[in-house]
Structures are given as C-alpha cells and as structure tokens.
Amino acid sequence: MSSVPTAGNPVLRVAPATPAAAAAHFRASLAFHADVSDVAAAVAADRDPGFVVVDSRSTESWDQGHIPGAVHLPTALIPGQAGRLLDKSVPVVTYCWGPGCNGATRAALALAELGYHVKEMLGGFEYWVREGFAFETWQGRDRRDADALTAPVGDCGC
C-alpha cells in the first residue's frame, strides 16, 4: 500500500487487510451470502435451481408478499418443521424483510445448526421487490417497477 497519510482519515485509520486476507474474507462471504439478482436469475433460468428459497417471516408478512416458489418457514418454527419441509441434501437460501432485518441470519443459523447447507439472501424481500422481480400475495402475482436506485438499467457488470 502506498504511504497515504492516515491521520484524520476514518477510512484508513485501520489499514486495509493484506490481499490474501481480503481474498479469504470475501471468498468466505460469498459462501454465506447470495444477492437478490443472482437468486432471481437462478430461479428464472431453471425449474430446479439446485436450492430452495425459505421465507422466514410471519404469516402476516408472507401474505403481504413473498418470492414465488419460496417455502414459508418462520424462524421460530424451524426446529420443529424443517425436517418435514426441507431436504438436507438441497441447499437453502433464507430471506426476511430487508437489509435492516437480521431474521434471515437467525433462520440461516437455525438451519445450519440442524445440518442444512445454507446461504442468506442479501437485501431480503425489500430488494426483491425494489429490483422489479415478481412476487406473490394472497391476492395473486404482482410486480412493481424497478427502483432506479437499486436496480440498474441493463447489466450492472458485477
């Protein structure tokens, strides 16, 4: 790293990790997380994307809207119902409301403790809707226009 002055610089007050440590960290992060666009692309591309999506929210939240094809399994019910609803040989992607909610993290932890391979979907249901993907409610299928602040026009290149 260059000798950039760090005094008073809140970003560089703690030096960045070494490239090797950073690579290990980010590789591990990808093992634990999936983003909304990747989940949507995998679900749209194949009837069996190789994983199951689990909505860990309450019934009232589920009724407001959920990802098509998701399994509804509130976090509190995971210990008693996961074995009946999920196959341990199929990876699970959990989601909850949005980035300000750690419900998907708690659900992922509960599932991992039961022996499931699991990832958390970053952004949750909020970003699913904000990126313009279809969702289901008790009234049927719906979709909103993508929010330009969260969903780029075309391919974002990432």
Image: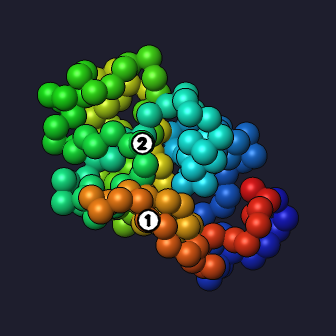
When asked about the image quadrant of residue 65, the answer is bottom left
Q: Mark 2 points at which residue?
A: 69
How far apart are the two marked residues, 2 and 1, measured between alpha carbons? 14 Å
Q: Earlier in the sequence, mark 2 or mark 1?
A: 2
Q: Residue flagged by tag 2: what amino acid is it?
A: Gly
- Is the C-beta separation of discs 2 and 1 under 8 Å? no
Q: Mark 1 points at which residue?
A: 142
Q: Residue flagged by tag 1: what amino acid is it?
A: Asp
Residue displayed at 45% across by 23% down: 90
Please state which of residues 63 and 75 is positioned toward the viewer in this rendering.
Answer: 63
State left or right for residue 25 relative to residue 102: right
Residue displayed at 33% across by 25% down: 86
Q: Can residue 99 be seen in this view?
A: no
Tell me the number on the disc at residue 153. none
The local secondary structure at tag 2 comes to: loop
Q: Relative to 92, is 149 above or below?
A: below
Local packing at callout 2 (Cα closer than 10 Å; few below 14, some 14-19, many 20+) is some
Residue displayed at 37% across by 66% down: 100
Give the image location of residue 24, x and y in percent.
65, 38
